[in-house]
C-alpha cells in the first residue's frame, strides 16, 4: 500500500477537485465523486499516511501524480 504522509484534509480535497472530483456530501468525512469513482476523505489533520495512499489509489492516481497536485 502506498503512503503519503503529512497531508491536510483540505489540501487533499483541493487536489482531488483539480482532477475533476466534486464534493457530494460533508460531515465527519468529505465525500467526492467524479461521476465514475467515489472517494471519502476523513477530516483529520494530517490524514493518516496509509489512508491518504489508499484515497489516491481509489481516485485513480499514482503517489507521484497526487503529490504533484498538492
Image (cartoon, rainbow, N blue to C red):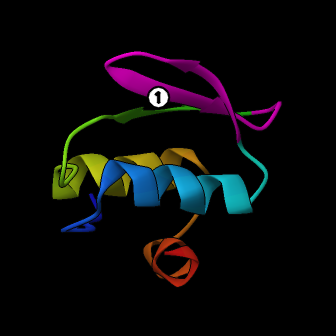
User: In the figure, is residue 38 to the left or right of 42?
Assistant: right
For disc 1, the marked residue is 30
Residue 58 place in picture, x, y as percent:
52, 44
Front residue of 29 and 58 = 29
Q: Is residue 53 magenta?
A: no
Residue 48 place in picture, x, y as percent:
16, 50
Q: Does 50 appear above or below 40? A: below
Front residue of 43 and 39 = 43
Residue 23 place in picture, x, y as percent:
65, 31
Q: Which residue corresponds to the image point at 77% horizontal and 38% vertical from the top-left? A: 34
User: In the figure, is residue 17 to the left or right of 45?
Assistant: right
Q: Which residue corresponds to the image point at 49% horizontal and 75% vertical from the top-left? A: 70
Q: Does 12 appear above or below 21? A: below
- Tag count in the figure? 1
Q: Is residue 34 magenta?
A: yes
Q: Quadrant of residue 3?
A: bottom left
Q: Main secondary structure of the magenta part?
A: strand
Q: Does 59 appear above or below 14? A: above
User: In the figure, is residue 26 to the left or right of 21?
Assistant: left
Residue stretch in magenta: 22-36
Q: Which residue corresponds to the image point at 18% horizontal and 55% vertical from the top-left? A: 46
Query: Which image quarter is the N terminus in?
Result: bottom left
Q: Which residue corresponds to the image point at 42% horizontal and 51% vertical from the top-left? A: 10
Q: Secondary structure at mark 1?
A: strand
**Mark 1 surroundings: few (<14), some (14-19) or many (≥20) residues within 10 A:** some
Amino acid at each position: 500500500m502506498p503512503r503519503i504522509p503529512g497531508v491536510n484534509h483540505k489540501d487533499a480535497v483541493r487536489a482531488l477537485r483539480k482532477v475533476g472530483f466534486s464534493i457530494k456530501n460533508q460531515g465527519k468525512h468529505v465525500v467526492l465523486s467524479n461521476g465514475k469513482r467515489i472517494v471519502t476523505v476523513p477530516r483529520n489533520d494530517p490524514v493518516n499516511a496509509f489512508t491518504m495512499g489508499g484515497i489516491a489509489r481509489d481516485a485513480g492516481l499514482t503517489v507521484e501524480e497526487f503529490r504533484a497536485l498538492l
